[in-house]
Image (cartoon, grey):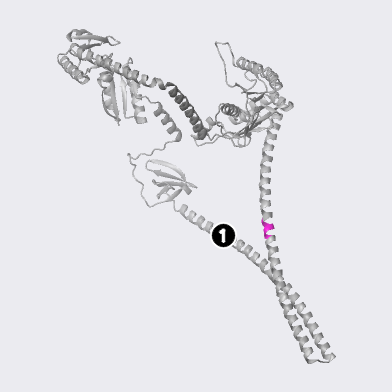
């Protein structure tokens, strides 16, 4: 039906155009769901039909020709039938579903709960969350805690969060964090607040598994500027309002977070009020994390049990924050150092130091020195621990070697003893033979005495020989073992020496080659930068640098980055594109593509204004790689449409443009296809 209406309307429009009633470039359009023809008000009597609407300017009247009225009415009837049929189907479906409503609701709630649990699990995986050891008391003993949102944000740029170690217990309930500006105080406070809130909301949190966490019945937060013109609140009065609520409601089961405690007013009275409020918090035995720059609050933490100082560490040599929390000492604000780094004149810094007094500046310096020394000794302690471990390993190795030597010695003694026993057995056999020969010969006493003397001499000589052999064998074996160990040592030393010699020779050879290579780089020769393919010509050599011409571009390059080549420099190829896109540019392009809208509305704008808006729009569309966009310019007098289309014809990135389909706006919208 729509097709036949469109055909009828087009034929009426062609006739009207041929009679001059309607402009040549006019197309049918849609008004209130009915297809109509735009006509000038003066000529509206020329076309029979119903006037449905007119443009905002009153220069166009939208007429529905009489020939298509019936067809459009039929479409309306069909749409009503369709709507009634949809209602009937939905009613039948509802009737079938009604008996199962309790089951459906139960399933719906179960599905929602399962989806919620799965979402928590997926988020925990994303942030590497876990459940710390939970205790039914007020406690905070966290190791390597990480702010999850900061972690996700930094991970995009390949950076890591510095993990936080923090402990709050019955003896140190309130932590006063001080330290330099932009040193991580607020991040530390927000990390604790967010993780505790996440934990009490049933989410897993990113920290080390040996961490312990407690439960707090109420959490109070005072962060940021709550100024309000309507409520007549300045920054300081809004802070005080929060303090009043906290003091009234907090107890030993509460956890409070205050950023920049006592700030935003005259320093002395601000510090005094802050100290008085802190005293009440301590009396109520509440837990909390508070950041401040006030010296009197640091002194209060030193002098009162239950309140403890903490410092955000700062590297004085590199002049940069380390983002590490250290509980036990207050931190310095490093105001003088930061002012000097930024480049404030030295006389201004000296004047400021004089105004505040040398005693305060010195105290600040002593504080910095204590923190620095603590870091130094902490480093030393780590080194000593490593060396002790190495010594223990060395002692253990030597003990093992000594035990092996002892075992070898015992083995040698055992073998020598066996050989001696063998000799003794042989000697006994000989004695037996002698006695038998004496008995057989029945010799005289003199002969017997002589034989016995010989026997005694033989036994003594045998024993002496056995002892001598035993000692010689032990000494020989021990000598062999020592020689073996010495050979091993010499071998190792020799190897090291050989390697050293060969390394030295190699280094000399490489140095010689490098010198020869650098000497070969002279004006007029062709070179390339190591790791690149572009060939350039050496224009001049100045010491360790050379001026190279790559086509029409001259650049200065260090000699050791160049290598000589026989290739000729190539002519610059215009078509070749060298594109280096930084990560930041890629991020911004991704954001641009994400938020790019495919339609632009320039209705009601002046010609030059609309043309500028369309120019930017088309440029952005080509930049983010859109294939199709729509420009809403309206029909009106057709001036905007003509101007925009004249511009589109000149854009190389535009492949094709035409009117939108009649149902979706017709001639009032130009659809642009981009390459």
**In this rendering, is residue 404 above or below 648?**
below
398 is within the stretch colored magenta: yes
Q: Nearer the viewer, residue 77 or 318?
A: 77
Q: Position of residue 195 (x, y in %)?
A: 58, 29
Q: Which residues are magenta?
A: 397-401
Taken as a whole, is the magenta stretch helix, strand or loop?
helix
Q: Is residue 37 visible?
A: no
Q: Position of residue 223 (x, y in %)?
A: 59, 22
Is residue 19 rendered to the left or right of residue 249?
Answer: left
Is residue 402 rendered to the left or right of residue 119?
Answer: right
Q: Nearer the viewer, residue 292 or 98?
A: 98
Assign a secondary structure to mark 1: helix
Which residue is rendered at x = 55% and y = 34% of the image? Answer: 129
Q: Position of residue 251 (x, y in %)?
A: 67, 21
**In this rendering, is residue 362 above or below 508?**
above
**In this rendering, is residue 479 above or below 225?**
below
623 is within the stretch colored magenta: no
Q: Quadrant of the N terminus?
A: top left
- Which residue was labeled with disc 1? 499
Which residue is rendered at x = 37% and y = 24% of the image? Answer: 597
Q: Quadrant of the C terminus?
A: top left
**In this rendering, is residue 517 above or below 643?**
below
Q: Is residue 251 visible?
A: yes
């Amino acid at each position: 039906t729509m097709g036949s209406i469109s055909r009828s309307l087009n034929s009426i429009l062609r006739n009207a155009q041929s009679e001059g009633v309607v402009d040549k470039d006019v197309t049918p359009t849609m008004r209130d769901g009915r297809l109509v023809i735009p006509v000038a008000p003066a000529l509206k009597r020329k076309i029979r039909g119903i006037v449905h609407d007119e443009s905002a300017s009153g220069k166009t009247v939208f007429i529905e020709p009489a020939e298509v009225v019936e067809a459009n009415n039929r479409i309306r009837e069909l749409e009503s039938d369709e709507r009634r049929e949809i209602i009937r189907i939905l009613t039948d479906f509802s009737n079938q579903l009604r008996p199962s409503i309790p089951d459906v609701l139960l399933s719906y709630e179960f599905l929602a709960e399962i989806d919620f649990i799965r979402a928590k699990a997926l988020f925990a995986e994303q942030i590497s969350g876990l459940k710390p050891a939970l205790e039914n008391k007020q406690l905070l003993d966290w190791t390597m805690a990480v702010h999850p949102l900061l972690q996700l944000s930094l991970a995009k740029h390949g950076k890591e969060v510095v993990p936080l170690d923090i402990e709050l217990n019955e003896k140190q309930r309130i932590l006063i964090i001080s330290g330099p500006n932009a040193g991580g105080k607020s991040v530390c406070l927000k990390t604790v607040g967010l993780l505790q809130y996440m934990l009490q909301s049933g989410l897993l949190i990113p920290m080390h598994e040996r961490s312990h966490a407690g439960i707090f019945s109420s959490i109070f937060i005072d962060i940021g500027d709550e100024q309000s013109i309507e409520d007549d609140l300045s920054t300081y009065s809004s802070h005080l309002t929060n303090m009043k609520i906290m003091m009234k409601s907090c107890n030993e089961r509460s956890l409070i977070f205050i950023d920049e405690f006592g700030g935003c007013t005259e320093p002395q009275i601000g510090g005094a009020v802050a100290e008085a409020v802190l005293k009440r918090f301590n009396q109520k035995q509440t837990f909390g994390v508070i950041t401040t720059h006030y010296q009197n609050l640091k002194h209060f933490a030193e002098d009162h049990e239950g309140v403890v100082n903490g410092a955000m560490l700062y590297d004085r040599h590199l002049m940069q924050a380390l983002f590490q929390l250290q509980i036990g000492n207050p931190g310095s604000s490093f105001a003088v150092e930061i002012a000097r780094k930024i480049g404030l004149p030295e006389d201004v810094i000296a004047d400021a130091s004089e105004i505040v007094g040398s005693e305060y500046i010195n105290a600040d310096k002593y504080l910095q020195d204590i923190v620095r020394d603590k870091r130094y000794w902490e480093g030393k302690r780590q080194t000593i621990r490593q060396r002790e471990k190495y010594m223990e390993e060395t002692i253990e190795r030597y003990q093992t070697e000594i035990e092996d030597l002892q075992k070898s010695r015992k083995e040698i003694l055992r073998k020598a003893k066996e050989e001696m026993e063998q000799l003794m057995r042989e000697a006994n056999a000989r004695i037996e033979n002698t006695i038998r020969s004496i008995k057989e010969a029945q010799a005289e006493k003199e002969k017997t005495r002589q034989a016995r003397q010989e026997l005694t001499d033989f036994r003594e000589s045998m024993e002496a020989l056995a002892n001598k052999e035993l000692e010689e064998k032990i000494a020989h074996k021990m000598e062999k073992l020592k020689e073996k160990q010495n050979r091993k040592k010499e071998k190792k030393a020799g190897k090291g020496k050989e390697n050293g010699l060969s390394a030295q020779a190699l280094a000399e050879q490489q140095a010689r080659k490098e010198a020869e290579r650098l000497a070969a780089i002279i004006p007029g020769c062709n070179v390339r930068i190591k790791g690149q393919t572009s060939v350039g010509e050496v224009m001049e050599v100045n010491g360790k640098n050379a001026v190279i011409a790559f086509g029409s571009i001259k650049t200065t390059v260090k000699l050791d980055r160049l290598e000589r080549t026989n290739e000729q420099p190539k002519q610059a190829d215009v078509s070749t594109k060298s594109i280096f896109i930084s990560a930041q540019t890629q991020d911004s392009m991704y954001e641009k593509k994400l938020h790019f809208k495919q339609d632009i509305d320039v209705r009601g704008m002046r010609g030059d204004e609309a043309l500028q808006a369309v120019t930017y729009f088309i440029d952005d569309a080509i930049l983010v790689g859109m294939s199709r966009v729509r420009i809403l310019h309206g029909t009106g007098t057709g001036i905007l449409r003509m101007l925009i289309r004249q511009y589109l014809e000149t854009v190389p990135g535009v492949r094709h443009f035409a009117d939108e389909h009649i149902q979706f706006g017709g001639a009032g919208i130009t659809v642009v296809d981009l390459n």
